[in-house]
Image: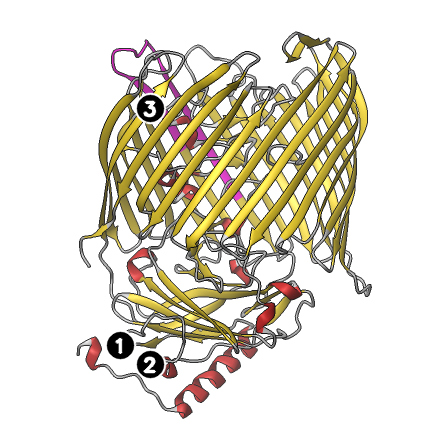
Amino acid sequence: MSWSARRPLTLTVFFTALSEVSRAEEASTGTRVAEAAIAAEAPILDGIVDDSIWQTAQVITDFVQAEPYEGQPATEKTEVRMLYDETHLYLGVICYDSDPSGIIVTDSRRDSNLDDTDSFRAIFDTYLDRQNGFVCGTNPAGIEYDGQVTNEGEGGGGGPGFNRSQSGSGGGFNLNWDASFQVRSHVGDFGWSAEFAIPLRTLRYGSTKPQVWGLNFQRNIRRKREEVYWSPVSRIYSLHRLSSAGELRGLELETPRNFKVTPYALGSSERDYVTSDENELDGDFGVDAKFGVTPSLNLDLTYNTDFAQVEVDEQQINLTRFNLFFPEKRPFFLENAGNFAMGQNEDVELFFSRRIGIGESGEIVPILGGARMSGKAGQYNLGVLNMQTEEALGVAPANNYTVASLSRELPNRSSIGALFVNRLATGDLAGDDDWNRTFGFDGKLGIGVPFTLSGFAARTDTPGLEGREHALNLRGEYQKNQGRVWLGFTEVGDDFNPEVGFLTRDNYRSLETGFFLNIRNDISWLRELRPHITYTGFWNFEGFKETENLHVDSHVDFENGAYFSPAFNHTVEGLEEPFEIYPGIVVAPGSYANWEAAWRWNTNVARPLSYEGGINFGGFLSGDRRGYENTINFRYQSKVITSLTWAYNDIDLLEGSFVTNLGQFKVSYNFTPMLYLQALVQYNDRADVWSSNIRFSWLNTAGTGLFVVYNDTEGLGDLLIGPQNRSFIVKYTHQFDILR
């Protein structure tokens, strides 16, 4: 029987009975259940959920608050309907609103943040492992928002600038996964609505019939700062908490085949003013391909890989002895990145993809090509990556990189995994014994709902190194609505050398602990108080204390969206050798203990005009620091988005004084959710440069389309004078769905 001939039941009695069955099952198991109906024909995607075919679907409703009143019914009604056919999963969403004039939209670019806007998101746990899933979402502007969740979204860590702590583990949420789906939205006097068409071949799943998936929905009502879910989620978690998700049933899916080819062509004009007197014209081409080996396992191939359209790094000023972390932004490496993540995020990463194709000082190293296989093989998550780079004179020889990972989810948020990383120099510039290997194992044990024990152990193998080549971590955390407490220990040997990974520092033992309280009250203008104390200490293997940070704070979360954090830090920095913090200023060996005020604040960032600020006032090494950071955000509707940031440090040490300035100006004009112009202008007096990165993007699907990029780096006149590098690039890439 053909799909077009299979007629779904449309009787109201049937769907009333279906809802009663779902409610009865929820009452007996505690798990919400939804059913998807077969679509005799595809709905017309216009954002208005009024096609007759939608009337054949179960109405999924009764959303529950996580914020502000956990467990209470949502103040505004939400209805979701789900259909499917041979090729697509369809969602029809109606977000009723008693005050449509109060709907807030803060951005209309693809994949823009959905937290500070009215929005809707769905998550699909296609293997029902309660830890991994795919997210699709939108806002009233009709943007496409999608991402990949691993490890229930756990991970994270402090970033550059004024952030005051770092923590986390591998995995998390990958916004750079692209589902090639379509969405349309509509705003009316009822509120707003959206229709999704999600290709089944982009959602990997098993071959069993019928399918049972994990499922949840989240809606944000921003003017009320209200977050509601279909399957209730505690306010201390997010949509990524798949162990709290409901179930989607009724999916009689055929095994999809997937074969997509994405070629690109590129033309560029570039001049390095330090080494050349004229522009260098160049043209290039390459291709990526994606092939579904099984319904749950994909093979990705790339030849002459290029990332010209990727936004440049945001500059940082380093006032420490340790390495700065710059995030990966290249789409090929970000897709399925969770399969290869192991260690402590931004501190000890056993595999860090920026080591492939980027030199130590940010130089581009050409990537000849590579392959990646990732997905599910039975009960196991599998990832295998192999990449070959070309030689770059004065930067690096040609190298071959291999990464292999294997992991498995276990009941109650638990998992185990293994990782292998290998770098082997190849070609004429390769020296003898020019290779490096990393071996790692990790695991997570969920005990009940609130307690999680996690850790990893790793070893590297490098020719010529025979010392402590190991790293390990063990961390326990107990978390409930009222707060959380944690204790962790990390050890990194002096010869632990993950050359295709990332280390903030090496040769240490560290201890981290703290507690964090979440206090709710009946004060109308106050949402929550979050008092907390954290401690982190680092010692070398001889017992010398290198770093200590005692952090005392209380976040004040105002009901109107404003925020204030009056933190105080007690810091210790121990130097065993001189440290040149600034040219000509060398801090003497010794231990330096200081107190500092590290305050942060912001107004409601969902408003058209908002302000974020921070100070660092107090002792710093042998003297004092006065640091300020101010950001002004302005948007006009969801079309024009701007942000101006200035970070200033005035440092006065016994050994000398200096000042640093770091400025950033971001602007985006969004013609449509798929057509926009962006600019990033940066000023860094420590590096003696200012730079601009201007990008025009006309997207088609899955991040492909037309890109026009202009880059300019100029000296400020202290060490560098005049233009340093300029480039103009035009790139077009298109995805061909061979089997459609």
Our reading of the magenta stretch's main secondary structure is strand
Residue tagged 3: 270
Mark 3 burial class by Cα count in 10 Å: few <14, some 14-19, many 20+: some
Residue depicted at x 60% and y 39%:
644
Badge nearest the viewer, 1 or 3: 3
Judge by depth and name the residue closer to the eye, 4 or 197.
197
Which mark is first along the chain, 1 or 2? 1
Where residue 41 is drawn, which disc sits there?
1
Q: Is residue 729 above or below residue 126?
A: above
Q: Which residues are magenta?
A: 420-443
Image-based side of 563 in relation to 490, left or right: right
Percent x, y of residue 137: 46, 60
Counting residues from the start of the chain, the first of labels 3 and 2 encountered is 2
* Residue on which the image places disc 2: 53
Going by the numbered disc 2, the residue's amino acid type is: Ile
Rendering quarter of residue 597: top right
Residue 425 is a magenta residue: yes
Q: Are marks 2 and 1 in contact (CB under 8 Å)?
A: yes
Q: In terms of secondary structure, where does tag 1 sit?
A: loop
Q: Amino acid at mark 3?
A: Glu
**Residue 54 point in image, percent of width and height:** 37, 79
Front residue of 681/529: it is 681
Residue 75, compared with residue 507, is above or below; it is below
